[in-house]
Image (tube, rainbow, N blue to C red):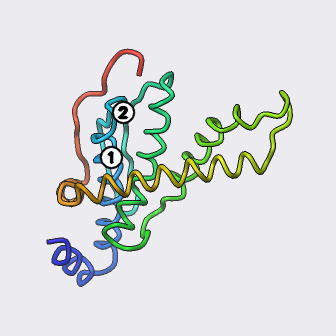
Amino acid sequence: MKALLLASLLAAGGSTTQEYGTALHEAGHVLVAMELSGCIHPFAVSIDGTEGRTDFQFNKAEPACLDDVMTVGAAGFAAELLVLRQSRTGSEMDFMKSVRLAADMTMPQCEVNPHVYEQQCMDEGIGRRMDRALNEAYSILSLHQDELLRIARDIYSAGFLELGDPPTGCF
């Protein structure tokens, strides 16, 4: 199924392939968020050509949620690698958000004094967190590849996906 879908998209070429890549990227975010611990709640996805957006809420006060947010952030890139074997859309923004989050989570462990941080500790800590997030996202998507393709197809066909109302409360 994956080979037929990709073959037809690649034969069409141009923007069709890019739009599917965008839908696939966003589907990665949605599927990984739904498979993780339950503290991340995706509620809307939209694409417009090569531009995509997945809206979700999470509990910022829960440390485990922050690790999951990094994994969800890496999931778009992981979906592209899994299905397309390369990154075709702009994963740079997701990557930068995840790096900032990894830095914020790593900084307390690397603090030498209140005003100085050991750069090597930061680099290694961020790298470990980013590698873990990408590996976990890729693993989840690998196990649920048919569902990933179904979600991507739904997003691609409609240009959006409604996943319900955002949760209320402390999110």
- Which structural element holds mark 1? helix
Question: Mark 1 Cα within 10 Å, few/some/many (few <14, many 20+)?
Answer: many
The location of residue 37, given as percent across then percent down, is 33, 33
Q: In the shown orientation, is residue 45 left or right of residue 86?
A: left
The location of residue 73, given as percent across then percent down, is 45, 48
Looking at the picture, does residue 25 appear above or below residue 37? below
Q: Quadrant of residue 168?
A: top left
CB-based contact (under 8 Å), mark 1 and mark 2: no
The location of residue 143, given as percent across then percent down, is 25, 56
- What residue is pinned by disc 1? 32
Looking at the picture, does residue 106 appear above or below residue 1? above
Placement of the N terminus among the 4 image quadrants:
bottom left
Question: Mark 2 Cα within 10 Å, few/some/many (few <14, many 20+)?
Answer: many
- Which structural element holds mark 2? strand
- What residue is pinned by disc 2? 40
Q: Quadrant of residue 149?
A: bottom left
- Residue located 36% across and 58% down the image: 25
Three-letter residue code for mark 2: Ile
Q: CA distance from mark 1 to mark 2?
A: 10 Å
- Residue located 25% across and 49% down the image: 160
